[in-house]
Image (cartoon, rainbow, N blue to C red):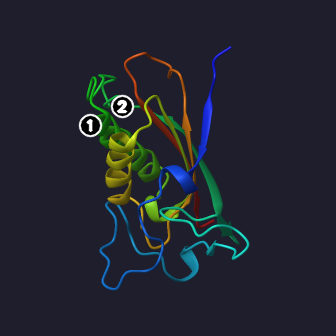
């Protein structure tokens, strides 16, 4: 039986303040959501839980259509591995794949309410790279709920990161 170490985002992916920033740029692939086409999302960080950094404790979707995206890995559209042995390059490809999957259903990263990260290595350097890439795609002022899990191995031994997502879009 493989051992799986589970780490809460509160401890592991911290480093990105959750407070709104004046003049913050929209993340890559982000389109503004307004009016009737936008699901109503509420990001909640209860005072009864530790202050989050880089994620939200709760994201409530009050209307909309749920989208579930399977775990994406660092394969390009032709199925070729991107970034053999390079955590940052693989993370970039995974987020590129997530963006393509979201676009296929008319969504972008502003619609993402939950991210699950699976990594084979978990140290400060890998966390820094993960945060840096992630923050170019999500809105760090309204981050999705998130989990980070260190695993012994992914589906292929050369893979080091996999990310799945849940998004909510207008009906």
Say which label, 2 or 1, has the lower sequence index. Answer: 2
Q: Could you tell me which residue is drawn at 70 percent across and 72 percent down?
A: 62
Viewer-closest of 130 and 74: 130
Percent of width and height locating residue 49: 69, 68
**Residue 1 position by quadrant:** top right
Viewer-closest of 170 and 29: 29
In the displayed orientation, state which residue is furthest to the right.
48
Viewer-closest of 91 and 149: 149
Secondary structure beneath disc 2?
A: loop
- Mark 2–mark 1 contact, CB under 8 Å? yes
Secondary structure beneath disc 1?
A: helix
According to the picture, the residue beneath numbered tag 1 turns out to be 89
Percent of width and height locating residue 160: 40, 28
Crowd band around label 1 with a 10 angstrom C-alpha radius: few (<14), some (14–19), many (20+): some
Q: Could you tell me which residue is drawn at 48 percent across and 72 percent down?
A: 18
Percent of width and height locating residue 158: 37, 18
Crowd band around label 2 with a 10 angstrom C-alpha radius: few (<14), some (14–19), many (20+): many
């Amino acid at each position: 039986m493989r051992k799986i170490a589970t780490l809460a985002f509160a401890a592991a992916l911290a480093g990105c303040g959750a407070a709104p920033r004046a003049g913050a740029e929209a993340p890559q692939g982000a389109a503004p959501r307004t009016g009737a086409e936008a699901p109503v999302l509420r990001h909640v960080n209860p005072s009864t839980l530790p202050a989050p950094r880089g994620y939200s404790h709760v994201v409530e979707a009050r209307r909309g259509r749920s989208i579930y995206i399977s775990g994406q890995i660092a394969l390009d559209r032709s199925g070729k591995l991107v970034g053999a042995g390079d955590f940052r390059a693989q993370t970039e490809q995974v987020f590129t794949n997530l963006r393509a999957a979201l676009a296929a259903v008319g969504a972008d990263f502003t619609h993402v309410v939950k991210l699950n990260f699976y990594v084979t290595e978990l140290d400060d350097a890998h966390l820094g790279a993960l945060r840096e890439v992630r923050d170019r795609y999500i809105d760090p002022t309204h981050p999705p709920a998130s989990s980070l899990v260190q695993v012994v191995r992914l589906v292929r031994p050369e893979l080091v990161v996999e990310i799945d997502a849940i998004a909510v879009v207008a009906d």
